[in-house]
Image (cartoon, rainbow, N blue to C red):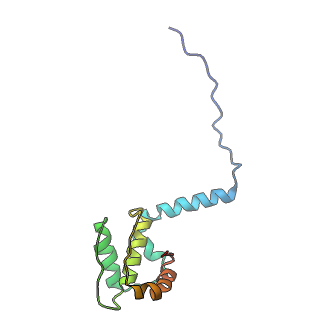
């Protein structure tokens, strides 16, 4: 029985000649992607809204544990449906639980609420 031919081992020394800006962007993207593992309320922490406790409880205590969730969000005017829906959608997107989301809103909301909801949640919408 003969032994296999000797092959020289390539050097395993890492080279650090990559573009530092590209590395920084890639590292930041990875950090953001994994942030949801350590922060269960990431959407709340990264939003400009300060919802009252009942909205936080509705989103994080009732809706998110039931993912995937198909629901109709209906409540009295001024109860914070838009904020709750925005938090739920943003959190689900950050957790990679949702690929697509359909939002059906009354016509009056779409023309008046579009700018206020997109500026407060940091997201954009298309018609």
Q: Residue at x 49, y 74 (%)?
A: 126
Q: In screen coordinates, is 17 left or right of 101? A: right
**Does residue 3 appear left or right of residue 54 in this picture?**
right
Furthest-bottom residue in view? 77
Q: Position of residue 120 (x, y in %)?
A: 49, 82
Quarter assignment of residue 56: bottom left
Tell me which residue sits at (50%, 84%) in the image: 115
- Where in the figure is residue 91, as x and y percent of width and height? 41, 70
Q: Is residue 122 above or below residue 95?
A: below
Residue 45 or residue 66, whichever sits in front: 66
- Residue for point 58% across, 58% down: 27
Q: Quadrant of residue 72?
A: bottom left
- Residue ID at (44%, 71%): 42
Number of disc labels: 0
Residue closest to the eye, 76 or 16: 76
One can see residue 124 in this view: yes
Q: Splitting the image into 4 quarters, where does residue 66 fall? A: bottom left
Residue 78, how many percent across, how many down?
35, 91
In the image, 27 versus 124, the foreground residue is: 124
Q: Position of residue 47 (x, y in %)?
A: 48, 78
- Against 112, residue 8 (above or below) is above
Q: Residue furthest top?
A: 1
Does the image show residue 41? no
């Amino acid at each position: 029985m003969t032994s296999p031919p000797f092959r020289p081992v390539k050097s395993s020394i890492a080279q650090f000649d990559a573009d530092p800006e590209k590395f920084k962007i890639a590292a930041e993207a990875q950090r953001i992607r994994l942030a949801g593992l350590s922060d269960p309320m990431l959407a709340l922490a990264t939003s400009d809204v300060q919802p009252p406790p009942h909205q936080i409880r509705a989103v994080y205590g009732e809706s998110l544990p039931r993912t995937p969730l198909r629901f109709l969000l209906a409540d009295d005017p001024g109860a914070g449906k838009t904020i709750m829906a925005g938090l739920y959608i943003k959190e689900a997107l950050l957790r990679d639980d949702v690929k697509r989301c359909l939002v059906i809103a009354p016509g009056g909301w779409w023309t008046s609420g579009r700018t206020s909801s997109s500026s407060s949640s940091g997201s954009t919408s298309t018609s």
